[in-house]
Amino acid sequence: MYFYMAPLEGITGHVFRRTLCECFGSVDRYFIPFIKPNQHGHLSSRERQDVLPGNNPGMYAIPQILTNSVEDFVRTARKLRQYGYQEINLNLGCPSGTVVAKQRGSGFLAFPEELDRFLDGVFEQTDAEVSIKTRIGKDSPEEFGRLLEIYNQYPVKELIIHPRVQKDMYRNHPNWEVFGEACKNSRHPVCYNGDLFCAEAYQKAKEAFPEVDRWMFGRGLLMNPGLCRQIRQGVGLDKETLRRFHDQLYRDYQEVMPGARTILFKMKELWSFLAPAFTHYEKYAKRIKKAEKLPVYEAAVDALFGEQQICI
C-alpha cells in the first residue's frame, strides 16, 4: 500500500513537508504544490525553494506543474530534471476560479480536444515520467468517459483521481461510481484522492475499492498529521509528538519567513484544521486566531497543549 501527501498550495511547502516527514513519516510520496510556468521560464523564489533537493531530505518528492502550454510544461520539466527529479505531476485538478478562468487545472478538462493535443506534445517532448492528478470533469461526471479515453492513449505513470467535478469545489460526496469505473477501465495505475479525513474514512474507501493500492491524503493530514502513521502502525496521534511537530514547524517558519505577521498567518492556517483534534478547543482556537504578536500566540498554544487532550 502506498500513501501520498497531496500538494496543497500555500500550505504543504518544503518546511511543512520536511517537518511532517521527520516527526511522523509513513508517507511514501510527497507532492510539491504546483509550479506555474511564467513567460520568462524562471522559477519563482518560492518554487525554487520548494524543489531544491536540500529542502526535501529523506523523502520521495514529486513536483507538480500547472499549465496548458506544451512549451511551458516541457521547459519547466527540463529544469526540474536538472534538480534530479525523475517524475513530474500534471495538475488537472485545481478547482480555483482564477485557475479555471485561464483554462488550467480542472478548467482544462472542459476542452478535451485541446487537452489531447497538449498531452501528445508533452509526452513526445518530455523524457521524465509524467503522472496526472485530475478531477472527473468541469461541470458533469459524464465528461470523465472521454477524458479517460484520452488519458489511456498516453504512457501516464499513474492517474490520481479526485472524483469530484470542478464546480463541486470540495462540496458533496466524492463520486465513487465514476471512480469505480475508472478503476475498471484505466490502463494506468489509479490513486484515490478525496475526503480521507480519518482512519475510518480510509478503511471505508479501501473496502469499496480493494483493488486500489495507492491513496492520497490532503486535508486529512492537516487535521491529523499522524494519520498515515495511525493507519499503518496503529499508533494514534499523541500530544508529545504533535507538540514536537508544532514547535519544529513554528521554529523553522521563523527562520525562513520575514516578520511575525507572515509567520502567524501560516500557523493560524494550520490551526484552522488542527484545533478540533483537541478536547474543548474552541476558546483556545479563538485566542490563536486573534493573536497579533508571537508571545500571545505562544501562550495560547501552551494553554491548549497544557489544558486539553487529544480526542481523535
Image: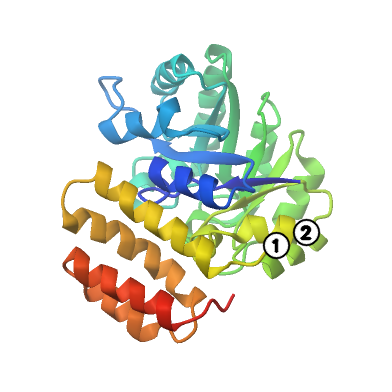
Q: Please, which colouring scheme is shown?
A: rainbow
Residue 64 in percent (x, y) is at 47, 34
Whether pointer 2 and pointer 1 mark residues with C-beta atoms closer than 8 Å, the reply is: yes
Q: Is residue 209 above or below residue 258?
A: below
Residue 228 in percent (x, y) is at 64, 55
* Residue type at numbered disc 1: Tyr
Secondary structure beneath dot 1 equals helix
In the image, is 131 to the left or to the right of 82? right
- Residue appearing at x 45%, y 68% in the figure: 274
Identify residue for label 1: 202
Q: Dot 2, crowdedness within 10 Å: few (<14), some or many (≥20)?
A: some
* Residue type at numbered disc 2: Lys
The answer to whether residue 16 is seen in the rendering is yes
Residue 25 in percent (x, y) is at 60, 48
Q: Dot 1, crowdedness within 10 Å: few (<14), some or many (≥20)?
A: some
Identify residue for label 2: 206
Residue 15 in percent (x, y) is at 39, 44
